[in-house]
Amino acid sequence: MTASFGQMLTAAREKRGLSIEDAAHETRIPAQRLRFMESGNIAAFGSLTYARSFIRQYSDFLGVDASTMLEELPEGVLGGERDYRYLTQSHGPWLRESETSVERIAVPAAGRVRSIKSPLPAAIAVFIFVLAGTAMWGKHVAEMRSQVEPAALKALPVDDDEPPVPAPAPVASSPGAVGAANLKTKHVDFPGGRP
């Protein structure tokens, strides 16, 4: 890149009243790359492909014709299809042998069974196993609860063999006293020796 083209870029940028940072923000090209272009330092890009792209983008942004400058730049190290012929040409019989082995793998033999390795059957089996285990545990817990009743819920035995104790004669002083006198009392034996 000639210094005169870099000076043209600098003049066009200054004519628009932009700083390097403003131009970097607008073009999304790093400011250091813009400085390299304006100083004519193409070697700092590291690759002529990057240099061409940045020069084209920056010159389009500033409205500067860069076609003559891009024609002056040397070609890249790789010159197109002719440099990639090693990808299209055969390098020996071993390459053709691998193609037949690929065909042999791709087309399954008639007697060979393909196995499908899917996690779905295993997941269903685990789900059924967990479901069955939960059902068995629930049945066990239900049976244990039905067999064991707490002692506090059992009815206490009442002896009806004792004759009723006669109630004292009612006193007619209050109406509630007459109802209380008619109650029967029974003796209850508590388990565990409580009086």
Image (tube, rainbow, N blue to C red):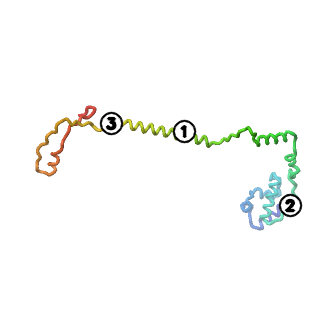
Quarter placement of the N terminus: bottom right
Quarter of the image where one finds residue 24: bottom right
Residue holding disc 3: 151
Regarding mark 2 in the picture, which secondary structure is present there?
helix
Residue at 74% x, 65% y: name it: 18
Instruction: State the quadrant of the C terminus.
Output: top left
Tell me the crowding category of disc 2: few under 14, some 14 to 19, or many 20 or more residues within 10 angstroms, Cα based.
some
Task: Choose top left, top right, bottom left or bottom right for residue 57.
Answer: bottom right
**Mark 1–mark 2 CB contact (< 8 Å):** no
Q: Are marks 3 and 2 in contact (CB under 8 Å)?
A: no
Question: Mark 3 and mark 1: span between their CA atoms?
Answer: 37 Å
Farthest top residue? 193
Sequence-first disc among 1 and 2 = 2
Q: Nearer the viewer, residue 154 or 42?
A: 154
Mark 3 or mark 1, earlier in chain: 1
Q: Position of residue 139 (x, y in %)?
A: 45, 38
Q: Please name the amino acid that badge 2 sits on.
A: Met
Residue displayed at 16% across by 37% down: 163
On the image, numbered disc 1 is attached to which residue? 129
- Residue at 77%, 65% in the rendered image: 14
Question: In the picture, residue 17 is in which quadrant?
Answer: bottom right
Crowdedness near tag 1: few (<14), some (14–19) or many (≥20) residues, C-alpha within 10 Å: few
Above or below: residue 88 compared with residue 67: above
Element marked by disc 3? helix
Name the residue that disc number 2 marks.
69
Q: Earlier in the sequence, mark 3 or mark 2?
A: 2
